[in-house]
Every structure is written in structure tokens, then in C-alpha cells.
Image: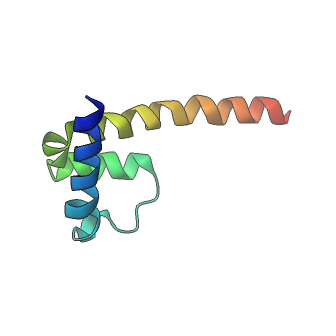
Amino acid sequence: MMVTLKNQLETYIVNVCDVDEMLFNLKGLDDLSEKLVKAKKHLNYSLVFRLVKFAFLLEWPLLQLKELLRQ
């Protein structure tokens, strides 16, 4: 599975980030996941999309923890 994820990430970087203008100027993980779904690229890069979703899910609790520690 890790090899498949590595291959998908490499292919994603080459084929999507370098040539797809709709992915420029993203403001966060939520923008990325929304645009991947709109372009149906989440179907081709399912493991990359899952990784983005996982990172997005972790972002909110980490921000809350950071705010708690700041108080």
C-alpha cells in the first residue's frame, strides 16, 4: 500500500500540480479536496485524496489544542 501511495503521489505531483491551473492559489486543504472532487481527480488519486482528507480531519483538533495551550 505504501508503494502504491508513493506512486500515486509522484504521479499526482507531475500530472496535476505542474499542469492543472485550477489547483493554483489554493487557500487550504479544504480548497484542495473540493477542487479534486469537482475535477473528479479524487477517483484517479484515491489514496492521495484520502491522505488530504485525513490531514484535513487532523487540522481542526490540532488548532483547538493549540488554542487551549495558548490560554
Q: From the viewer's perspective, is 50 left or right of 20?
A: right
Residue closer to the observer: 25 or 1? 1
**Image colouring:** rainbow
Screen quadrant of the C terminus: top right
Residue closer to the observer: 67 or 20? 20
Q: Residue furthest right?
A: 71
Q: Residue 23's image quarter? A: bottom left
Q: From the viewer's perspective, is 38 left or right of 55?
A: left
Q: From the viewer's perspective, is 33 left or right of 66?
A: left
Q: Residue furthest front?
A: 3
Screen quadrant of the N terminus: top left
Residue 55's spot in the image, x, y percent? Answer: 45, 36
Residue at 14%, 47% in the rendered image: 40
Q: Residue 33's image quarter? A: top left
Residue 53's spot in the image, x, y percent? Answer: 37, 35
Residue 43's spot in the image, x, y percent? Answer: 13, 40
Q: From the viewer's perspective, is 62 left or right of 29?
A: right
Q: Residue 26's image quarter? A: bottom left
Residue at 29%, 43% in the rendered image: 6
Q: How many numbered discs sit on the rendered protein?
A: 0
Relative to residue 71, is residue 25 depicted above or below?
below
Residue at 37%, 40% in the rendered image: 52
Residue at 13%, 44% in the rendered image: 44
Relative to residue 8, is residue 54 depicted above or below?
above
Residue closer to the observer: 6 or 18? 6
Residue 36's spot in the image, x, y percent? Answer: 24, 49
